[in-house]
Amino acid sequence: MERMGMPGEERDAFLSDVRALLIADRARTAARILALDKDFTAIVEDAQLTATDDEHDPDGTTSAFERSQASALLASAVEHLSDVDSALSKIDDGTYGRCERCGAEINQERLLARPAARTCITCASRPA
């Protein structure tokens, strides 16, 4: 079977390389989620231990900002982990490398740069 512009053996080697990248990315992302979750919990617990008035205390805004930032980073990491898991599943079911919007094949260079990419460059540059 020839897809992504390469013969079967070359494609299998490519997918093996991409799988290794995704597995490493998954491990890093899972570790990041654990660290961010720990940070978020510490920020919330610290806020509960002090009588902080976010509106009038100069440090209150910092506390609210830190909580918001940690929450956003955590959500982003969880979403990325989902993308990585989806890419690994697509490798397993033979659908990896197809744009989820237009169905075209995603460029090999893009997949090497962003193995969890869900869209081709053209669709990625368009508004959602």
Image (cartoon, grey):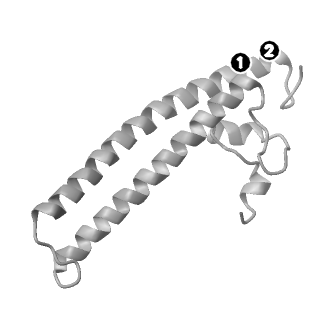
Compared to residue 74, the image places residue 23 above or below, namely above
Q: Are marks 1 and 2 in contact (CB under 8 Å)?
A: yes
Q: Is residue 13 left or right of residue 34?
A: right
Name the outermost residue toward the bottom. 56
Q: Position of residue 61 (x, y in %)?
A: 25, 76
Q: Quadrant of the C terminus?
A: bottom right
Which label number is shown at residue 80? none
Compared to residue 123, the image places residue 36 above or below, namely above
Compared to residue 31, the image places residue 23 above or below, namely above
For disc 1, the neighbor class at 10 Å (few under 14, some 14 to 19, many from 20) is: few
Name the outermost residue toward the left. 50
Q: Amino acid at mark 2?
A: Glu
Q: Quadrant of the N terminus?
A: top right
Q: Amino acid at mark 1?
A: Ala
Q: Residue at x 61, y 25 (%)?
A: 19
The quarter holding residue 9 reads: top right
Residue at numbered disc 2: 9
The quarter holding residue 124 reads: bottom right
Measured in 3D between alpha carbons, the distance from the residue under mark 1 to the one under mark 2, in whole angstroms, is 6 Å
Q: Position of residue 58 (x, y in %)?
A: 18, 80
Q: Is residue 83 left or right of residue 98?
A: left
Q: Is residue 74 left or right of residue 112?
A: left
State the SS at label 1: helix
Which label number is shown at residue 13? 1
Q: Residue at x 77, y 56 (%)?
A: 123
Label count reads: 2
Q: Residue at x 38, y 41 (%)?
A: 32
| Front-lying residue, 84 or 3 | 84
State the SS at label 2: helix
Q: Position of residue 71 (x, y in %)?
A: 38, 58
For disc 2, the neighbor class at 10 Å (few under 14, some 14 to 19, many from 20) is: few
